[in-house]
Amino acid sequence: MIVYPAEDVGMSSERLRRVNDYLDREVAENKLPGMIAIAQRRRIPIHHSLHGLMDIEAGRPMEADALFRIYSMTKPIVSLAVMMLHDEGRLQLHDPVAKYIPSIGKMKVFSHVTDRVPQFVGQDPAMTVFHLLTHMSGFSNGKDPFHPADQLYQQSGQALGFYRRDMPLEDLVAHFADLPLKFQPGSNWNYGVSTDVLGYLLQVIADMPLADFLKRKIFAPLGMADTDFHVPQEKVHRLARLYSSDAVYDPQLIPHEDAALGDVRQPTLCPSGSGGLVSTAADYLRFATMLINGGELDGARIVSPMTIKRMTANAVPRAYLPLKTGVERYGYGFGLGFRVMIDVGQANGYSSPGEYGWAGAASTYFVVDPRQELIILLLTQMWSHQPHPPRSIVPNLVYQAIDDLNDA
């Protein structure tokens, strides 16, 4: 990637070097295996750095074309794909999900506990496509050990083996449909498996496998040749290894077969819309650039500017904020597949009204700031419990390098 002086787009090269200083220090202190960091302003790349190793055991340095499990950075892509169907008139946001997946309409909702026995009632209102896109569907993620719905999700997941790569996506959604919702659709916000259900809903409406739809409608037009739900044999050598740590240092290798959502070297019958994609820095930068351009890149129109505007408008009532996940919670609302900055005064750092993006479980992260014409992309493979991960610090180090602030 050709990188231009930051001064060409109203930024300071000297202050932008703080990104390198910080990430080199994180690697030297054994807090990160390795990372790629990219910043682009006004369509011009002004930072592209490689840090540390993509394979600690092999001593292999991070490489520009490394493949990363992007986990939940899959969600914006799948959400955009569903909105493509919306723009073709094939669905509406407030359509009941049961119109396309009947089993969803039969799901019960946790109500209360009587004599230590959880009580469940019918949906009121019925879950809609809008609820799935905004994570207000009531689906659980099984993370609350004290909530009856989460407990059932955990028990079922252990028994049935959610996200097995030999299990059709239809069967995964059927498993979810057998479980109760955590709350009535639209009555709260909870980060769960909604986008997995969206992926299957897309398959049903488009009459096409999710992976094929994404490849034909998004990846091929944008030239995202390395983004897919599995890594073919000829590309396996480019796959960055996945690490974890229970502390803030000492990355420990996670074997391929033990990674969340399975071994991405193997094909899958169960493409997870919530987190199954593998991608590269170059590919995801093209996706983010299409977003900031209002749905178009290099002559390929994916969606309309109105679609991007709708998806990046906050849809979550302020009573349900702050978001109950990650460093992104403060100042952010949530649109149709993206976190959305609505209150800069509450933010964890620097931002602008309307800035949006999302993160992945292995510490991947992206920022799209239309006001400052800025994209920030971070890719690593660290499943970590760091209290201040790079995704909460590097964006600040990029923003503080801006001299020519867009105030409009």
Image (spheres, rainbow, N blue to C red):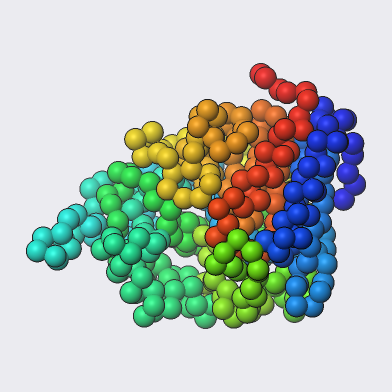
Residue 6 rendering spot, x and y as whole percentages: 85, 34
The residue at the point 79 percent across, 58 percent down is 51
The residue at the far top in this view is: 408
Image spot of residue 226 (x, y percent): 74, 63
Q: Quadrant of residue 146?
A: bottom left
Residue at 71%, 22% in the rendered image: 406
- In the visual, does 103 lie left or right of 4? left
* Residue in the picture at 54% in, 35% down: 347
Quadrant position of residue 256: bottom right
Reply above or below: 82 against 53.
above
Between 141 and 96, the residue placed more toward the observer is: 141
Residue lying at the far front of the rendered structure: 29
- The mark tally for this picture is 0
Residue sitting at 81 percent across and 30 percent down? 11
Of all residues, the one furthest to the left in this rendering is 115
Q: Is residue 291 visible?
A: no
Front residue of this view, candidates 38 and 202: 38
Give percent across and percent down for residue 294: 66, 36
| Residue 188 visible within the image | yes
Identify which residue, 265 or 91, lies in the foreground. Answer: 265
- Give the answer, above or below, for where 389 lies relative to 260: above
- Which quadrant: the C terminus? top right
Spot occupied by residue 150 in the image (x, y as percentages of width and height): 32, 63
* 377 sits to left or right of 196: right
Q: Nearer the viewer, residue 147 or 64?
A: 147
Q: Is residue 271 left or right of residue 217?
A: left
